[in-house]
Image (cartoon, grey):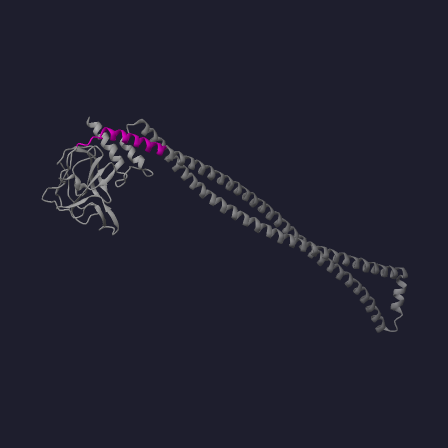
Amino acid sequence: MMKKKHLAAKCIAAALSVVITAGAVTYNSGEALSAASNFSGDSKVKGYEDQIKKADANIAALKNQIASSKQDLASAQADKEAYDKLVASYMEKIEVTNNLIAELETSIAEKTDEISGKQSDYERKYELFKLRLRVTHEEGQASYLEMLLGAEDIADFLSRVDRVGSMLEYDNKIMNTLKDEKADLEEIRATLENQKKEQEVLKAQLAADEADMQKKSEEAQARIDKLKSDIATSQAYQAQNEKLREEFEAQLEARIKELEEEQRKKNSKYVGGDLQWPVPLDHTKVTSGYAWRTSPITGRKELHNGIDIPAPLGTSVYAANSGTVVIATWHYSYGNYIMIDHGGGIMTLYAHNSQLLVSVGDTVKKGQVIAKVGSTGDSTGNHCHFSVRKNGSFIDPMQYFK
């Protein structure tokens, strides 16, 4: 019997701890899971909890996977951008090299033409030189001797010898000059051809590098496409799991409400009678009643849903009637507070206590000390805030005192 009362108390506590001031119990996202802990023995509740936890695990894993994929995507996009810049750079260098090769080919062609010209001059003059020698030979040594012996005196003879030598020396000099010029041109052409070969080697290397970067860029693009596809797939799975989670949470909330209603029906009989004053009778002054007022904490107009009874710190707080403790916890506004279910839709609330002396599920009797006066939560001094709820709505508690 005691276990059933504890279960009933926990069921009601789960409902009331969610929305204290509302007329009907509703759950925000995640609160159904918290309330479900009071019904851990129910197979349906456990099944919904397990499904929600599984969905949560899937969602967390997918979020991590998406975050990791997005990092990889950013890296792949950066790689592709770098590869594309290198490809463009290599293409520019190849174009410059092609232009240089074209210029070298033009220069080589020009030098080849010059060499051909020098060769023609050389051959032409060489033929004239050979012709002169042949004529000289054909006319014989006599003509040569006659020219020398025809000299009038020794001075004229020497002059004629020098003239003949000069002619031979001139012809030889012309031939040597032509040979040297041709050799210089051939050397220049060879240099240009070597430069062209070097540029062609450079072009081949640049083309290979450009092809390598192009391949890497394509591989990076393939990675980008795959990562985008993976992210889209993971996001779709995440959305599916989030939808499933919402469905399971809605089913869990519905099941909890069903169980709470069952427990409420089991505890629907009010014990009856008037309520006992919640503190010793030497503290009967009410400083703030059940009414609309300007909050001393927020400064806003609001409904004060109970009565405030000043009392020294540590003063005993009594249960106004017999019932079951459904809430005994901390609240940011109520501080340490207790709620007791008296059946028949009647509940009483005791707030701002310095100490709680009962726990959820405890059965208390009318007049039992359940707490000590304090000033916890939103409070300006030691007092007992006392409220009455009827069928989920706060009402003026003074009508229950005689």
| Relative to 217, 351 lies left or right | left
Residue 251, given in percent of the width and then of the height, sits at 35, 32
Residue 195 against residue 335 in the figure, above or below = below
> Where, by quadrant of the figure, is residue 351 drawn?
top left
Residue 12 against residue 281 in the figure, above or below = above
Q: Residue at x 52, y 43 (%)?
A: 220
Q: Is residue 104 on the magenta stretch?
A: no
Residue 318, given in percent of the width and then of the height, sits at 14, 38
Q: Is residue 255 on the magenta stretch?
A: yes
| Relative to 284, 223 lies left or right | right
Residue 109 against residue 267 in the figure, above or below = below
Of residues 17 and 164, which is closer to you in this image? 17
* Quadrant (top left/top right/bottom left/bottom right) for the C terminus: top left
| Relative to 105, 78 lies left or right | left
Q: Which residue is situated farthest in the left direction here?
A: 282
Residue 293, given in percent of the width and then of the height, sits at 22, 49
Of residues 378 and 72, which is closer to you in this image? 378
Of residues 202 and 34, which is closer to you in this image? 34
Which region shows up in magenta? 248-271
Q: Residue at x 35, y 34 (%)?
A: 250
